[in-house]
Image: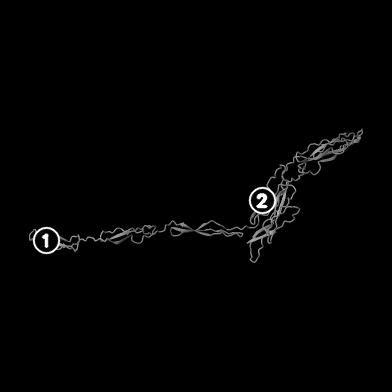
Amino acid sequence: PGLRASRRDCVNQTSGGLSCVGYGLQFQNCSGYNESYQCDAIGYWSNWTSWSTCSVSCGIGYQYQTRTCLGAGFGCVGEAINTTTCNTGVICPIDGTWSSWSSWSSCPATCGTATVYRTRNCTGASSGGVCLGSTLDTQLCDTNVSCSRFPYNATNGGYSAWSKWGPCSSTCGSGTRIQTRSCTKPLPSYGGSYCVGSPINITSCNSTQPCPINGNWSTWTSFSACSGTCGNGESSRMRVCSNPAPANGGQQCQGTSVEIQNCSTGIDCPIDGIWGNWSLTTPCFGTCGNGIQIYTRNCTPPSGGGLMCAGPTRREEICNLNRPCPINGGWSDWSNFTTCSVTCGIGVYSRIRECNNPVPQYGGDLCIGPPLETAYCLTNVSCPIDGGWTTWTSWSNCSLNCSGGIQTRTRDSEQEFAPFGIGFELLIQL
């Protein structure tokens, strides 16, 4: 996979106007790589230029700096122009607005025609601003009375001297002040004509205290290009509190200077595969003791060129079958031999072992072999040997032929040598 780009240029930028808003270069993922095709290289940017002069001579404007994409290929990643706001520190002149016209003055003549007037005030002008037009409007008035009917000589009217200037109409910024004169020097009479000229003189005046200027927003810029290279992103537009900028304690603009909205690039983002939860697919199996149970999991397929899940799809765990395995018996160590069974001659001694290492359980086999082992032992001491009797002989004849005689029988020792033994016995009966 690689990237492909589309580029657009900002045209028709003249007379210090702002550069186009948005990106001049867009990228999207692409596939279809061909080894025989030489890829174009992405260009690289030069250093930023110095900031331009501010786009306005008063109030808040814009200034910009640029850089150049060097090298061949699809262009450079990023913007070729960088803009920011600038404040000249100079308050822009603000033209005032006219109030409504006053009512017309009454016609001062008693016959013939005369001049009537009305006035209006310029309000809100500051920093050298003005209202376009006149503060005074005049027109002729006709009394519909002919002055020739009066029997005396006509006396034309004449103006008095101008009055002193009145106070300034505004307590801040620019205003007007008025001086007047009256057609009384002399009054027109007997059909004389009314004074020629205006009875009111208006001039501008400036207060030493500048008027507060409340800020007002400029128009919104166009929305920027959608952020990001795939999926959804954001685009924004901005406005500046410069139409006019707040001054002399005036209120700031109400609201936000930046507006952001969701947008779509129209390009699917790569989404890697996602493992599902482990699930038990093979319950615990075995014959006894511990067994094995098997878990598996599935990978949700990736999309948009995303990667497959990494890791195994199967795992095994040890489990308990709750069925003890048979335990065959095992002999303990032999005990020490006992003492010899005799104190002289030849005897025996023995030793034992137990089937408890381990004890047979759960149907296991008993220990194989004898629990007792015997052997001959030699004391190296000769034992006394008692004689052994032979069978008794028959009884002898009675020693008397009348009562009171004796008869005898004998037996002999079978041992020729019977140390410490008894070798002869005589039994006599009457």
Q: Quadrant of the N terminus?
A: bottom right
First along the sequence among labels 2 and 1: 2
Using residue 358 as the reference point, say whether residue 292 is left or right of it. right
In the rendered structure, which amino acid carries the disc numbered 1? Gln
Instruction: Give residue 96's position: percent from left, percent from top.
Output: 77, 43
Residue 349, image quadrant: bottom left
Return the mark for residue 382. Answer: none
Q: Quadrant of residue 360?
A: bottom left
Question: Which residue extends farthest front?
Answer: 380
Describe residue 198's horizontal placement relative to residue 61 as left or right. right
In front: label 2 or label 1 = 1
Q: Is residue 120 visible in the rendered structure shown here?
A: no
Q: Name the image quarter holding the C terminus.
A: bottom left
| Number of disc labels | 2
Give above or below for 110 relative to 389.
above
Which color scheme is applied? one colour
Q: Gap between marks 2 and 1, in whole Å?
A: 152 Å
Residue neighbourhood size for the residue with mark 1, other residues' Cα within 10 Å, grouped as few (<14), some (14–19), many (≥20): some
Q: Look at the numbered disc 1 and give the secondary structure of its residue.
A: strand
In the rendered view, tell whether residue 34 sits above or below residue 221.
below
Q: Which mark is residue 407?
A: 1
Q: Is residue 84 visible?
A: yes
Q: Which mark is residue 260?
A: 2
